[in-house]
Amino acid sequence: MIHITAITTHNEILDNIPLSRTEQPDIAWYWIDFFGAEMHETELLRDYFHFHPLAIEDCFQHMQRPKIDHYDGYRFYVLHALNPDTLEMEEVDIFQSDRFIVSFHLHESPGISRVRERFFASPGLAKKGPGHITYMIMDQLVDEYFPVLYKIEDRLNEIEDSRTHKSYGTLMNEVFELRTDLLNLRRTIIPMRDLMYRILSLDHVKESRETKAYFSDIYDHLLKLAELIESNRDMTSDLRDSYVTLNSNRMNAIMMTLTIVSTIFIPLTFIAGVYGMNFDNMPELHWKYGYFIVLGVMAALVAAMLFWFARKGWFNIFK
């Protein structure tokens, strides 16, 4: 599918026109969007526009790192969009010169659709040329990163504040899933940040000088996103460490309980074992009150041991 929009020298916007119309002298510049194009349509990249074979090859290879390449008369951008449902990267390629902008993407791009809607809603944008449309696409793709990251951040805050009735094991599984999502976001955002830094650093890129404030704004957004990712990854690490510490404390409490119970029953078992032996000449066996005396000794031992444990602070772990 090919969507062709042209702007005349009188800043009139022509939409859904044939490709041949773009060659007319009254056309100032035009925007062609390739979306899920068929083979005979993609051949236009080579046969009509005569783009470099390496750039065309990059359009079909998954996934290229975000970059900018300079060719004779045009520039080639590789950008990354983000699927909000799967958090997978989706490549958006842009060929841009002073006379045209050609966008190419194999998957549907909500970002480009929104840019087109804004373009038709604000006719004044037609005067700014292809370079500004490239900026708008970049800005829209970056803006779409924020809702996904904010959603992850909100969920981490909920887990940290314990506003949930889920078990700790379930929560930790969710934390590890969120950490994986953050890693996927990082793989998308950091290369885009590096690309924007390179664009701002290239003196021979005309648009980056004239609209430096715009591209700097995108770069600032990417810096903020990178910082949010790192802070959220730190939060997941803190939650993981807290979970490990909590589990260790619970295990220590369990072991302490078993130790106290075992320690108390060791002398009781010894006494019961002694008086459970079947010897005839055991004088205590014939005492009238021997049974009650032994029970009293056992109770006294338990009380003395509990008092000693309390003095040593063994019960503080249960507080």
Image (spheres, grey):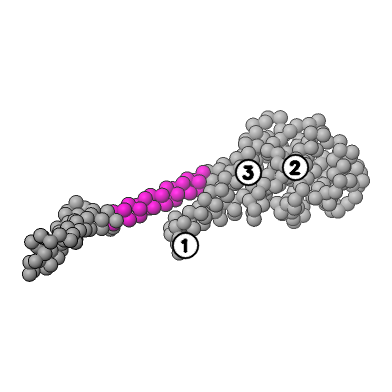
Residue 241: image location, x then y, percent: 42, 47
Q: Which residue lies furthest to the front in this view?
A: 280
**Looking at the image, is mark 2 or mark 3 earlier in the sequence?**
2
Question: Image quadrant of residue 78?
Answer: top right
**Taking 89 as reference, is 160 left or right?**
left
User: Which quarter shows the C terminus?
Assistant: bottom left
Q: Residue at x 64, y 47 (%)?
A: 142
Q: Nearer the viewer, residue 225 or 260?
A: 260
Label 1: few (<14), some or many (≥20) within 10 Å? few
Mark sitting on residue 166: 1
Residue 242: image location, x then y, percent: 40, 50
Q: Please say if the residues under marks 3 and 1 sit with CB atoms less than 8 Å apart.
A: no
Tell me if residue 131 comes above or below residue 269 in the rendering.
above
Q: Name the residue under label 3.
A: 188
Describe the element under mark 1 as helix, strand or loop: loop
**Taking 244 as reference, is 186 left or right?**
right
Residue type highlighted by circle 1: Lys
Q: Mark 2 points at which residue?
A: 93
Q: Which of marks 2 and 3 is in front?
A: 3
Residue type highlighted by circle 2: Asp
Q: Is residue 205 magenta?
A: no
C-alpha span from label 2 to label 1: 43 Å
Q: Which of marks 2 and 1 is in front?
A: 1
C-alpha span from label 3 to label 1: 31 Å
Q: Please say if the residues under marks 2 and 3 sit with CB atoms less than 8 Å apart.
A: no
Say whether residue 9 is visible.
no
Q: In the image, which residues are magenta?
A: 230-257
